[in-house]
Image (cartoon, grey):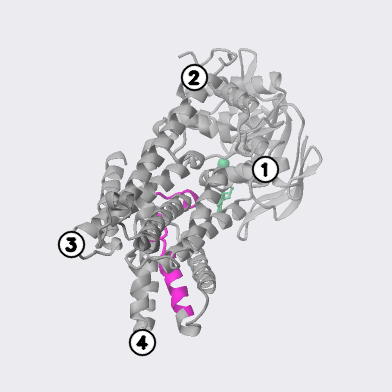
Amino acid sequence: MSVLAPARTPASTTAPRTAVRARSNAALVGGVAALAVLAAVSLFVGVADVSLGDVLSGRADYELIAVSRIPRTLALVLAGAALATSGLIMQLLTRNVFVEPSTAGTLDFATLGLLACALFWPDAPVLVKMVLGTTFALMGTAVFLRILKVVPLKDVLIVPLVGLMLGGVIGAFATFIAYRTDLIQSLNAWTTGDFSAVIAGRFELLWIAGALVVVAGIVADRFTVAGLGEAFTTNLGLDYRRTMTIGMTVVAVTSATVVITVGALPFLGLVVPNVVRAAIGDNARRSVPWVALLGAALVLLCDLVARLVIHPFELPIATVLGIVGAVAFLILLSRRRVRG
Amino acid sequence: MIIATHVSAAYGETIVVDDVSILVPKGGVTALVGPNGAGKSTLLAVMARLMGAKAGTVSVDGLDVTTTPSEVLAKRLAILKQDNHPGIRLTVRDLVGFGRYPHSKGRLTDADRVHVEQALDWLDLTGMGDRFLDELSGGQRQRAFVAMVLAQDTDYILLDEPLNNLDMAHAVSMMKRLRKAADELERTIVVVLHDLNAAAVYADHMVAMADGRVVAAGKTPTLMREGLLSDVFGLPIEVHEVAGRPQAVFYAR
Ligand SMILES: Nc1ncnc2c1ncn2[C@@H]1O[C@H](COP(=O)(O)OP(=O)(O)O)[C@@H](O)[C@H]1O
Ligand SMILES: [Mg+2]
């Protein structure tokens, strides 16, 4: 390689680039198709049997399908896609691959907001709950970012540990309050993700989280730029603080809606973006669709496992996700050890 | 033309740039030299609105950097800081593509892509476009960052120690390319250099800083003087004519 060679006029590279893009679009279409199959399987698995044959021959319990099965599958897809995307956004904005709503205390703060609502305005409309949950989640994110700024953390691993501790403290405080006020049951519903109670009329809030995935896809470039750091962001003429605020708001709203409707789903935002990162990198314009897709797929799968292992009973999906997430976390750590 | 007028900058209460006024003429290469801690990086950051000044103003072709909208400035002036950690996993081509952000807001047009390929080519990175930054050597990564600010296609390019991590061949190559960018692409390059001799050969103008102040500024030959350089760096420095160029000699036993 001659480093002193004069600059050559670049060969046209537009054609091969277009081919690459066409191929990755085709892969994405394949991914969506696979997700659709998975969703269909999820639709037909449950305590009460519904088979495709029944549906086709008109013997199925359509009410069951419309009221319970379809909402549950939709909720799984929306929550999975949204939380995984939130994880990606947080990782870009904090420049730390171990940060996600459950390792930054965000979910715990959202839960505390809901608890506050249950205490002071038990019959509040669901939108009020969402606003409160979001506000608390945003406050939690601000506290987390503040800690990161004040305490110089040398190791990337310390960051999520600080977040987990922060979440632990808030969680303990919430438990104490809930215990004193007889709200432990509500608290459990928020802290332990579970889709078994999802029926029509009780999950629609998740469409907001789904819409935010689309928003994230549209402003993806800003998140990638912010991921390069404050100096790069300012150099490119982008307002760093505003980008942080947009991103963290998306994360907070997503966290609040998911906690309200189905409860916390741990590690989802950690596992999925890291798998996608290893494969195609961090350019969010390219990775958001994959993260959303795989997030939905992972939740559908874990939900199937949760429903089948102790059939006819059900495990909370949070338990299954917790195991999957913990194993993935360990794999990530050991790979880091090898590289570092 | 970049004009800094009575600029002071501080971290907390510690003033590290103290009442600095300089004028960077349009065109050519201006080298900023001085010992570690002189305030070169801080001054550069203030000039590029990455950091607020405690006092004073900076204007770029008449645009005040603190009041001009950031996205307008981003088309006039690009800066690359001293230590850059990508932090995220991007390919070289994607990174350089983000240099086009001020123009395209992310949706690259064919014209943008031409700029990207040219910048890659200029830094000898064409074969590495699809490699991830975190899988490159420090020097290759440094070149990728420079390609990014080049693709930004601004009149002014501010570079803070771009020779960091480069071996001799790549350091020479980098300086030649900066020189060429000034001569052929009519860019104005402001570059912090710790290698006095690189400045002596490639810069038209030099600014010497020490202790947060400008000690001397002017055409390169007027700064390559023994007494002046010895004072600035606090080290005996001899200047000899080598191959028609003033060169500083400072390693001594
Ligand atoms: N982020 C910072 N916080 C506090 N002090 C800093 C910071 N960055 C630089 N300094 C101090 O400011 C002075 C000037 O630093 P800098 O502008 O980086 O100098 P140079 O680039 O000439 O080596 C140094 O004394 C340095 O220790
Ligand atoms: Mg410096």
**Residue that label 3 marks:** A310
**Chain at numbered mark 2:** B
Q: Give how far across and how far down residue A55 sits, in percent.
A: 32, 52
**Residue that label 1 marks:** B48
Q: Are marks 4 and 1 on the same chain?
A: no
Whichever of callouts 1 and 2 sits on the residue coming sooner in the sequence is 1
Amino acid under label 2?
Ala
Q: Which of marks 1 and 3 is in front?
A: 3
Left or right: residue A264 versus residue B141 is left
Q: In which quarter of the image is residue A306?
A: bottom left
**Residue that label 2 marks:** B169
Tell me the quadrant of the picture where the N terminus of chain A can be found: top left
Crowd tier of the residue under label 2, counting other residues whose Cα lies within 10 Å: few below 14, some 14–19, many 20 or above:
few
Q: Does the residue labelled 4 lie within 8 Å of ligand 1?
A: no
Q: Which range is magenta?
A: A92-117
Residue A111 included in the magenta stretch of the image: yes
**Residue that label 4 marks:** A180
Crowd tier of the residue under label 3, counting other residues whose Cα lies within 10 Å: few below 14, some 14–19, many 20 or above:
few
Q: Are marks 2 and 4 in contact (CB under 8 Å)?
A: no
Q: Tell me the element at label 2.
A: helix
Amino acid under label 1?
Ala
Amino acid under label 4?
Arg
